[in-house]
Image (cartoon, rainbow, N blue to C red):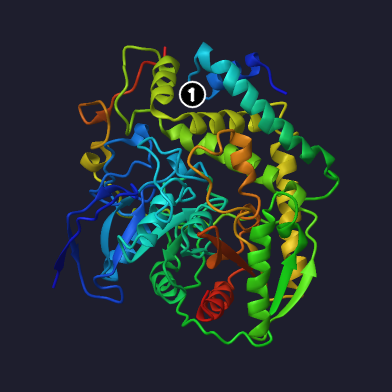
């Protein structure tokens, strides 16, 4: 179960924005899904995850990449060859 | 010598988001073959939106690896197809630009999320299509529209240029009206790509063979159990009898991990989505931000405006699953369940060559029929196991119920895509 407050908090963390008018619907739907996930609580948690994973790295050599113009071509706002983003402070 | 083809389809099912009226193509194994590409795969100079408002107007400055391979093979890329926004859905109703209709019954969905690709191929608007499959997004619409669709073994096709939703699950794959054509398309797109470190050097150059004498087929009881329309189960069992008549041997198994598979899938994919979709902040692409506002306010406003509800819901669920205090409860357990799914497959595959069952628990839904998210998610129960394990799976038409097609799903061992293609081919040759 999640509360309306949980949904509001998580929506804020994820920067997805949420309206008061949507809170009830999102809370009900997310609760339904998270309740379904509770089946995972019945798993034997003493099993070890044994899959090995490894990184595949290449030598740090310069390879072709996008030009500055190409990189900027889809930006909503640019200034002097840079992306323009909202202020942080 | 470049050739030109004119493409002006009568798209009454809304399969395409973008069409190319004059297509240039070259020489090669697919010379002049018309290919539709799902709109989450980058095409240089051609708008690529993932069926999301947040990417409206986005023109990729580069081609996805598969698109470059298609062009090199002489294929004519005729357009970009509709989909559930960012691949999140089972019906293509979650497109920001309106749903695609099922060509066989326009009151029904084509399946999703590669619904536009399936509908374009099924209605004959193009020869073949490229889709992506995170939890069934190629196989589901293939089943619902009566065509063939393959989710390759994870790592066999490069994801470079695929706009990521859930990296550890998704693969790009071919869709076609028959197995032989699908196989031809697959041979062009498979292979190693240094720009996708998860690809392996296993190119595909197989000619489908209909000889399945002695093939061992596993049947998983849970694939015919609760939630599966008994009429679908019946059609699929008839298909299995056909395969037996061709010399295959069928044996029954249980798969205890099926109980956890859907939860494991949705915890994993929403978690990965919450991270992947963080890049859509309106700075490098998107409509542009109000830079007078503070960071969080500007981002939240744009993402609320630009993402549909299902995308925001999945980002919220994924953020929740990964949040401090909940990680152990959801994400970690989902990985244990994911391992159980892999272990179950490996156990069964020690005995058999392929596993066969229904692709979807039902025939294509009516438009608007699945309005509750969880009800929609439950429809993915038979397709997600292959993504969780990374094994290959194909859907091939095997009959009809009320004039709507049913898909036979054939799942294979790691890197044994050839075997499931042969099995599908053998079945197809018998005609339905």
- Name the spot of residue B362 as percent of width and height, x first: 61, 53
Nearer to us in this view, B276 or B426:
B426
The mark total stands at 1
Residue B392 appears in the figure: no
Quadrant of the image containing the N terminus of chain B: bottom left
Image height of B270 relative to B116, above or below: above
Subunit of label 1: A
Q: Quadrant of residue A39?
A: top right
Which residue is found at the position 32% from the left and 21% from the top? B289
* Disc 1 residue crowd, few under 14, some 14–19, many 20+, Cα 10 Å: many
Image height of B2 relative to B327, above or below: below
Nearer to us in this view, B141 or B209:
B141
Residue B80 appears in the figure: yes
Which residue is found at the position 64% from the left and 14% from the top? A5
Nearer to us in this view, A22 or B238:
B238
Is B143 situated left or right of A27 in this image?
Answer: left
Which residue is found at the position 33% from the left and 47% from the top? B14
- Name the spot of residue B6 as percent of width and height, x first: 16, 61
- Name the spot of residue A43 as percent of width and height, x first: 82, 44
Which residue is found at the position 39% from the left and 51% from the top? B116
Q: Quadrant of residue B126?
A: bottom left
Image height of B360 relative to B243, above or below: above
Helix, strand or loop status at disc 1:
loop
Is B386 situated left or right of B99 in this image?
Answer: right
Is B170 situated left or right of B414 in this image?
Answer: left
Label 1, on which residue?
A16
């Amino acid at each position: 179960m999640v509360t309306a407050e949980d949904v509001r908090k998580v929506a804020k963390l994820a920067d997805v924005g949420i309206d008061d008018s949507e809170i009830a619907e999102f809370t009900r739907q997310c609760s339904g899904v998270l309740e379904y996930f509770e089946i995972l609580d019945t798993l034997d948690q003493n099993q070890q995850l044994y899959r090995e994973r490894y990184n595949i790295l290449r030598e740090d050599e310069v390879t072709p990449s996008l030009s500055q113009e190409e990189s900027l071509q889809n930006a909503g706002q640019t200034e002097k060859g840079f992306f323009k983003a909202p202020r942080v402070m | 010598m470049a050739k030109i083809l004119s493409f002006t389809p009568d798209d009454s099912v809304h399969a395409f988001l973008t069409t190319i009226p004059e297509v240039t193509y070259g020489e090669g194994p697919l010379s002049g073959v018309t290919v539709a590409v799902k709109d989450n795969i980058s095409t240089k100079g051609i708008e690529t939106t993932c069926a999301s408002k947040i990417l409206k107007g986005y023109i990729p400055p580069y081609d996805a690896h598969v698109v470059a391979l298609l062009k090199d093979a002489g294929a004519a890329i005729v357009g970009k197809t509709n989909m559930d926004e960012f691949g999140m859905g089972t019906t293509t109703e979650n497109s920001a630009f309106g749903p695609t209709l099922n060509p066989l019954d326009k009151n029904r969905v084509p399946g999703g999320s590669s619904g536009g690709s399936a509908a374009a191929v099924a209605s004959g608007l193009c020869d073949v299509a490229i889709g992506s499959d995170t939890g069934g997004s190629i196989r589901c619409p293939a089943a619902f529209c009566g065509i063939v669709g393959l989710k390759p073994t994870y790592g066999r096709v490069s994801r470079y240029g695929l706009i990521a939703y859930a990296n550890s699950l998704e693969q790009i794959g071919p869709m076609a009206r028959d197995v032989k054509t699908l196989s031809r398309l697959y041979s062009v797109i498979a292979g190693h790509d240094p720009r996708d470190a998860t690809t392996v050097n296993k190119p595909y150059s197989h000619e489908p063979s209909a000889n399945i004498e002695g093939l061992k087929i596993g049947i998983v009881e849970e694939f015919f159990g609760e939630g599966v329309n008994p009429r679908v189960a019946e059609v699929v069992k008839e298909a299995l009898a056909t395969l037996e008549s061709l010399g295959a041997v069928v044996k029954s198994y249980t798969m205890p991990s099926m109980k956890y598979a859907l939860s494991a899938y949705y915890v994993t994919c929403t978690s990965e989505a919450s991270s992947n979709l963080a890049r859509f902040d309106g700075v490098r692409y998107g409509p542009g931000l109000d830079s007078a506002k503070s960071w969080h306010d500007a981002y939240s406003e744009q993402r609320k405006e630009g993402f549909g509800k299902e995308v925001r819901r999945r980002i919220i669920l994924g953020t929740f699953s990964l949040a401090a205090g909940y990680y152990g409860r959801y994400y970690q357990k989902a990985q244990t369940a994911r391992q159980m799914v892999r272990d179950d497959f490996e156990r069964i595959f020690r005995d058999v060559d392929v596993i066969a069952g229904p692709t979807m628990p039902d025939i294509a839904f009516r438009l608007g029929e699945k309005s509750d998210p969880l009800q929609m998610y439950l429809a993915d129960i038979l397709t997600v196991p292959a993504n969780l394990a990374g094994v290959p799976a194909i859907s091939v038409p095997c009959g009809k119920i009320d004039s709507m097609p049913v898909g036979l799903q054939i799942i294979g061992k790691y890197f044994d895509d050839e075997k499931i293609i042969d099995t599908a081919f053998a079945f197809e040759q018998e005609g339905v």
